[in-house]
């Protein structure tokens, strides 16, 4: 890490305040702008502490971004990235969110998993078999995002990472425990807004297979000394490009074999 503790805290204050007040930022000041992944994740963790203290609750799950070609091309980032999801921002089945509390809300269609075991790390890293044993359920989900920048395309990847890649919450569909009979790689998903399909994809679009994304996150977090825990959920990446929405919109994400999640704004 290259930033000082004071710089990390300074950046975290600005990012946390932007979320609490729904105020977009032009950029982070040069003296607290992250230049490395370690700096970005350090700021992100400090933001978690500040928002939890402000009443957002603990981190209940995790999001993985930039795991599909459509999102890597949209954000011009060619590697996965991770963030947390606050307990207070998670809805089950159907979720309603207040437009007034966001800058520029958007939605993404995702496959999510619920962990039934800790993932403390494994010599040589995890593989599909080992990671699959820790997946207790699979579900459809909608990630709610919020663009909290005046121009996100002008931000370096490390600043987007510090701000959790627009993370704002998620709706988790019904959990399917008997998921092993399904082919997660070939299952199709699509997203509908106000009755019109706005995007579609397949599980294999996520790093070749959805479990590859979970392997990446489990290995990454174990290496950072913050392993994934039983009971947490993970959203694995969007099958469609982000769609920006407004008050009154109804969003449905449906994944074959998993059912649907519904979000209204």
Image: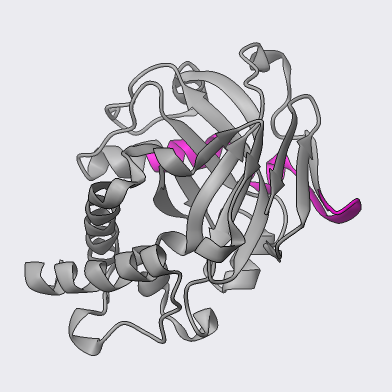
Task: Residue 208 in the image: state x and y as whole percent.
Answer: 64, 44
- Residue at horizontal 42%, vertical 52%? 82
Residue 79 visible in this rendered orientation of the protein: no
Task: Residue 239 in the image: state x and y as whole percent.
Answer: 70, 50
In reply to whether residue 259 is colored magenta, the answer given is no
Does 264 sit above or below residue 95?
below
Does 121 sit above or below residue 133?
below
Residue 261 horizontal side relative to residue 235, left or right: right
- Residue at horizontal 66%, vertical 56%? 107
Task: Residue 105 in the image: state x and y as whole percent.
Answer: 61, 64
Quadrant for the N terminus, please. Answer: bottom left
- Residue at horizontal 45%, vertical 36%? 215
Does 45 sit above or below residue 36?
above
Residue 94 horizontal side relative to residue 124, left or right: right
Residue 46 horizontal side relative to residue 209, left or right: left
In reply to whether residue 214 is colored magenta, the answer given is yes
Magenta-highlighted residues: 192-217
Give the quadrant of residue 91: top right
Residue 212 horizontal side relative to residue 58, left or right: right
- Residue at horizontal 72%, vertical 14%? 181
Total marks in image: 0
Give the quadrant of residue 32: bottom left
Of residue 200 and residue 251, the one placed in the foreground of this image is: 251
Residue 20 visible in this rendered orientation of the protein: yes
- Kindly give the residue lying farthest to the left in the view shown: 5
- Kindly give the residue lying farthest to the top in the view shown: 178
Quadrant for the C terminus, please. Answer: bottom right
Task: Residue 228 in the image: state x and y as whole percent.
Answer: 34, 32
Of residue 155 and residue 170, the one placed in the foreground of this image is: 170
């Amino acid at each position: 890490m290259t930033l000082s503790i004071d710089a990390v805290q300074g950046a975290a204050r600005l990012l946390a305040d932007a979320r609490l007040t729904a105020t977009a930022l032009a950029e982070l000041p040069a003296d607290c702008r992250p230049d490395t992944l370690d700096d970005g994740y350090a700021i992100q963790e400090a933001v978690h502490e500040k928002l939890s203290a402000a009443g957002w609750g603990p981190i209940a799950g995790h999001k993985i971004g930039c795991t599909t070609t459509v999102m890597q091309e949209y954000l011009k980032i060619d590697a996965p990235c991770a963030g947390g999801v606050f307990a207070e921002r998670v809805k089950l089945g159907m979720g309603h969110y207040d437009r007034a509390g966001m800058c520029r809300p958007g939605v993404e269609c995702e496959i999510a998993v619920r962990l039934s075991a800790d993932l403390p790390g494994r010599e040589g890293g995890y593989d599909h078999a080992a990671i699959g044993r820790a997946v207790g359920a699979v579900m459809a989900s909608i990630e709610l995002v919020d663009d909290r920048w005046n121009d996100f395309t002008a931000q370096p990847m490390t600043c987007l990472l510090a701000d959790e890649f627009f993370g704002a919450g998620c709706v988790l569909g019904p959990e399917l425990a008997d998921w092993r009979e399904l082919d997660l790689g070939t299952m199709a998903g699509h997203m509908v807004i106000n009755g019109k399909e706005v995007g579609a994809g397949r599980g294999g679009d996520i790093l070749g297979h959805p479990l590859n994304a979970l392997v990446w996150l489990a290995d990454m977090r174990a290496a950072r000394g913050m392993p994934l825990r039983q009971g947490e959920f993970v959203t694995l990446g969007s099958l469609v490009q982000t769609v920006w929405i407004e008050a009154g919109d109804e969003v449905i994400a449906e994944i074959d074999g998993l059912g649907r999640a519904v979000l209204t704004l």
